[in-house]
Amino acid sequence: MGTSIEVNSTTFPTEVLENSHEKPVLVDFYATWCGPCKILKPTLEKLVQEYNFILAKVDVDQNPDLAQTYQIEGVPDVRIVTQGEVKPGFVGVMSEPKLRQLLAELNLNSELETELETLQNLTKSGDFQQAKSLLDQLFHKYPNNPTIIIEAAKFLISLNRLEEANKLIETLGENNREYYPQIQQVKALIHFKQEAENPGDSELDQTYAKACSLTLSANYEQALELFLGLVSTNRRYKNDGARKAMLAIFNILGDDNSLSKEYRQQLLLNLY
């Protein structure tokens, strides 16, 4: 975890230049009247909770000498300082994924991402008690973090506590654009779990439940093959459920995945 501080002309040499010999410093030159600055600020504040860097914020109106020294012509202007050297960063608003890429280029790792990977490994190995303990720590350390809420919902699904998982994921809201794909993934996993645990009596029901079970165990190719067969057999089954299930798997895998590309094409051929 890093630190976020306000700096001025007096503290800049120590808090920014000297400290940059210990860890990278991102200097956010901003103005209180600047709309883009207000958009960028919460993203920077979020990331400094995960990565070990210093976020030094400089109000250009209060520190015109610093703005002049570093030739700040527009805000927000973020500079990167390492080993006492102030380097160009970016001007304007940068998206969170690109900011994470920038931090990775500075050889910084997200503590949260590392801890979430540990959580996933504990869950896969069946060490649910340790996983629950780590989750509690993460909620305390990063309160109201959507990524942790999503992982907690997945953890509840692994425990077959589906109603609790659904209630938790609903707290993020249906219209949360930034996390919409992950929210939909969790909802799909809840659906797959429900169907796998409660198969019907017909042959179609059994096939659908088996495909759902294969999805949960990450046997995506076999699952897609079964769902595709259901699309070919009966489009109306479960209100076009097999096609929707395939789309959910594409979302889980990502559009660039080879299975997504192959079966999306096969699905289109079956539909048209």
Image: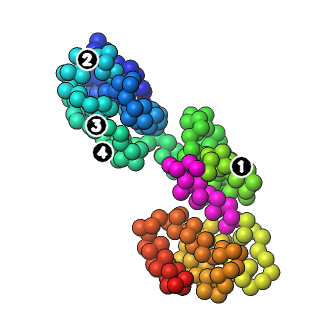
What secondary structure is marked by label 1? Answer: helix
Amino acid type assigned to the residue bearing label 1 in the image: Lys
Q: Is residue 43 left or right of residue 199?
A: left
Quickly name the residue at label 3: 91
Outermost residue toward the right?
Answer: 201
Secondary element type, mark 4: helix
Left or right side of 105 for 207: right
- As measured in the structure, the alpha-carbon distance from the residue carrying label 3 to the one carrying label 4 is 18 Å
Of residues 35 and 118, the one nearer the viewer is: 35
Please tell me how crowded label 3 is: few (under 14), some (14-19), or many (20+) other residues with Cα within 10 Å: some
Total numbered circles: 4
Looking at the image, which residue is at 31% across and 18% down?
Answer: 61
Provide the residue designation for mark 4. Answer: 105
SS label for mark 2:
helix
Q: CA distance from mark 3 to mark 1?
A: 40 Å
Please say whether residue 91 is one of the residues in the magenta stretch.
no
Q: Which residue is mark 1?
A: 167
Q: Which mark's residue is nearer the viewer, 3 or 1?
A: 3
Which percent across, then down, holds residue 193?
A: 69, 65
> Which of marks 4 and 3 precedes in the sequence?
3
Look at the picture and state if 175 lies above or below 191: above
Q: Position of residue 87 (x, y in %)?
A: 22, 34
Q: Give x and y (percent) for residue 189.
A: 64, 62
Residue 253 in view of the camera: yes
Placement of the N terminus among the 4 image quadrants: top left
x 57%, y 67%: residue: 248
Please tell me whether the stretch drawn in magenta is mainly helix, strand or loop: helix
Which residue range is magenta in the image?
Answer: 175-193
Closer to the eye: label 4 or 1: 1
- Determine which residue is flagged by label 2: 64
